[in-house]
Amino acid sequence: MAATAARAGAGRRNWLLGVVVLACAAGGYGAVRWLTAAPSGPNVVVGDGRSGPADMVWIAGGQFQMGSESNVAQANERPAHPARVHGFWMDRHHVTNAEFRRFVEATGYKTTAELPPDWETLKPQLPPGTPKPPASALVAGAMVFVGTAAPVDYSDFSRWWRYLPGADWRHPTGPDSNIEGKDDHPVVQVSYADAVAYAKWAGKRLPTEAEWEYAARGGLAQATYVWGDEFTPGRKQMANVWQGQQPRQFPVVSAKAGGAVGTSPVGSFPANGYGLVDMTGNAWQWVADWYRADQFAREAKRLDSNVADDPKGPDDSFDPTEPGVPVNAPKRVTRGGSFLCNEDYCMSYRPSARRGTDPYTSMSHLGFRLVMDEADWKAMQQQNKTRAASIPGGARGS
């Protein structure tokens, strides 16, 4: 399929390939004091911008079983194995449209989807020998979920996804769309490269895969979902995923409703045990690690009876599951599922579910959230104090 799209001169890598469309395209610390009130329980610690980074939750760290042995777990989630992470701060919710806009306005940054695809980063995702397409075919844009008018065979994702020139973070479902009134929605149509650029500007970083899963579990060991083992406890919808949110079978959308399916405001559903919202559902999330489909098996074999301390993931990528894409094509891990995840096509709204994604891909159901180490927070505080002291009256007003 990738080669076919390339011959058609379609443009971007995320249109030429289905690298992540299968990823549910079918989705107390001693030094911390005086923090804001906890949103979901007495042990939740949320930074107020003074004693902790604003709107970030302190994750105390600890040991857990990473991966899953559940009967719904995929091969790339097995086997469950012990891992340990240090304490860190994590964004309470996805980076929003409003937050990303501030970054763009401050820096003038152009996202991957706003630029013509770069052949040197596109080429590794294509079969060896694929000829370079003409410059006229390398058109800025991104992948957009368009749905179908009737049920279809799930073997061909191109029936419900389309590459749209002009789609980007400001126009997430195509050039005629916009994000007006959606400041509190997750920013989407951002690549891994975009997320890293934002993180550098914000003084934060992407979480490791181990940090992300530990935080997503919210203290529940090996639970099926981030809230427990029942999908809708007390018939309550717990996440923005297809079932319960959409009236028709995936990927069918109502033409009358204009295909009304997408992200919801962050925090529309209950937080997990650590006070984090939308850890699953709403939008997929980039994490730092390179993706290997066999990484958990490799890690379990390497560890034997030991525990992995702050695992940082593999040094390369490996994914034999994408037809037409080299098995070692660069991919980064994406986690959490999205508003498109469903029980018929995938169940990636689980804390152990994982996929690999081309780092330069942008999609209408893919965003991110960040973390910060305590040492970096303290260093940022010190820098702010030094900066304030250098301004006349700054020390008195700080």
Image (tube, rainbow, N blue to C red):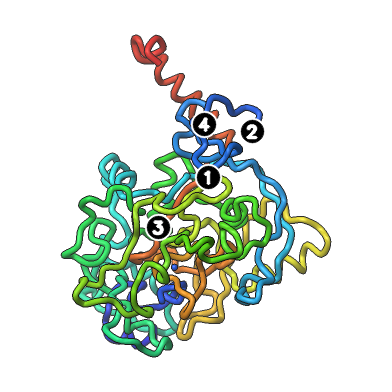
**Above or below, comparing residue 266 to residue 4 in the picture:** above
Counting residues from the N terminus, which is met first, the one under dot 4 or under dot 3?
4
Counting residues from the N terminus, which is met first, the one under dot 1 or under dot 4?
4
Residue lying at 53% horizontally and 61% vertically, measured from the top left = 233
Tell me the quarter of the picture where residue 162 sits.
Answer: bottom left
Q: How busy is the neighbourhood of tag 2: few (under 14 within 10 Å), some, or many (20 plus)?
A: few
Counting residues from the N terminus, which is met first, the one under dot 4 or under dot 2?
2
Tell me the quarter of the picture where residue 217 sits.
Answer: bottom right
- Looking at the image, do the residues carrying marks 4 and 3 touch, with CB atoms under 8 Å apart? no
Query: SS for tag 1?
Result: loop
Residue identifier under label 3: 367
Q: Which amino acid does label 3 sit on?
A: Gly
Q: Distance between the residues labelled 2 and 1?
A: 15 Å
Query: SS for tag 3?
Result: strand
Q: Where is residue 383 in the image (x, y as percent from the top left)?
A: 47, 25
Counting residues from the N terminus, which is met first, the one under dot 1 or under dot 3?
1
Residue identifier under label 4: 52
Q: Is residue 219 visible?
A: yes
Residue identifier under label 1: 275
Residue identifier under label 2: 29
Query: SS for tag 4?
Result: loop
Q: Distance between the residues labelled 1 and 4?
A: 15 Å
Q: Distance between the residues labelled 4 and 2?
A: 10 Å
Q: Where is residue 259 in the image (x, y as percent from the top left)?
A: 25, 72
